[in-house]
Amino acid sequence: MNHAIDRQQALFQAAEAARYAPSVHNTQPWRWVVSADRLELFAAAERQLHTQDPDGHMLQLSCGTALHHARLALAAEGWQHEVERPADSPLAVIRPTRHTPARPEAARHFQTLHVRHTDRRTVSDEPVGTDTVEALIHAVEREGARLHLLNRDGVIELAVLVEHAQRAQATDVRLQVETAAWVGGERADNAGVPSSVLPAEQPRTTVAERDFGTSGTLQAGEGHDTAATYAVLYGSGDEPADWLRAGEALSALWLTATERSAGVLPNSSPVEVPFIRHELRRLIGDLGFPYLVLRLGTFGSEHAGPDRTPRLPVEQIIEVRS
Ligand SMILES: Cc1cc2nc3c(=O)[nH]c(=O)nc-3n(C[C@H](O)[C@H](O)[C@H](O)COP(=O)(O)O)c2cc1C
């Protein structure tokens, strides 16, 4: 067996699998360079939301989810690896070290990354079970981040913060123009959020879903979000490498939730508006830096759920160097 070819092929397949990772507005702001002995992850500045996300926090979170997907794909092929996170350029470098039999859980996660998706329908009355919540906390902590669950009062406070954040963003005309470029329609450009995954009407919720400024065609359901669990993904640092790690934690949480039939809906508005992020930090008892708000919930089985969002072609995001 030629391990050199095997290794480069596994690295290419890992970058290919990472295309399925979630990203803010489905911008897919990553680029991969595959060499014989390593896989490098770069940020694609041309797909950064420069108005909504001037510091690149959401871009780094998104690249972190792709990094975690790539790591999983390598593990599913039995490649142990080391990851370096210079968190500048490249953002990360993955180097395979040894080939061993793949662990079954790695293969399972690899299957899951192909079906994970964002579901903006209202959640059912069945809350996410405590054992699942425990598993999500564990998945996040294994990746070096933390998860703070909000109690009933915390959820009400969060609802107010989200409303203020959305109002601040709704009055920013440049931001509205930027959002419109990425959200709505059929997305023939293989990026962005198609109208088929956006609710036809604003769902009835305590904590508002993100206002994309346009409605879609998804039937969101009649329910209310009273059985939802709201959580804040947070951590001890605010540097690019911390946001990248938070993205890896988000991916680990989301795949674990998917395997346990729980849905995850991120809301980044309260993190994007600086004075609201400050309040969000207070809401989690100053435990650390908030990275993302997450709604966790379950869905009834009577509806197949939203469509899959498109992905950029391999040639556009992966470069192979011999
Ligand atoms: C960092 C980040 C922030 C996100 N913020 C939001 C948000 O505020 N509201 C929302 O409805 N979806 C949000 N999403 C979900 C993305 O829109 C979604 O992942 C993307 O459109 C790809 O679709 P998929 O998850 O179904 O593959 C976010 C995702 C990431 C990774």
Image (spheres, helix red, strand yellow):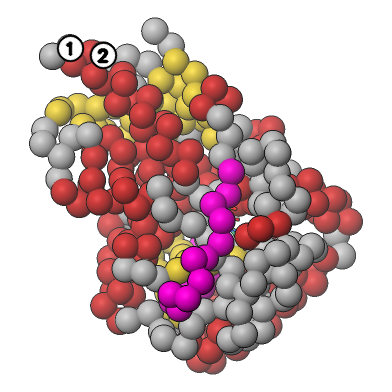
In this picture, is 269 found above or below 252?
below
Question: Horizontal and vertical percent for residue 222?
Answer: 62, 85
Say left or right for 198 vs 288: right
In this picture, is 108 found above or below 128?
above
Circle 1 residue: 2
Residue range highlighted in magenta: 286-310
Q: Callout 1 environment at 10 Å: few (<14), some (14 to 19), or many (20+)?
A: few
Amino acid identity at mark 1? Asn
Q: Callout 2 environment at 10 Å: few (<14), some (14 to 19), or many (20+)?
A: few
Question: Horizontal and vertical percent for residue 161?
Answer: 67, 77
Residue furthest to the front in view is 302
Q: CA distance from mark 1 to mark 2?
A: 6 Å
Image-quadrant location for residue 101: top left
* Quarter in which the C terminus is drawn: top left
Image-quadrant location for residue 1: top left
The verdict on residue 23 being magenta is no
Q: Residue at x 48, y 38 (%)?
A: 19
- Res. 24 visible in picture: yes
* Cβ atoms at labels 1 and 2 below 8 Å apart: yes
Circle 2 residue: 5
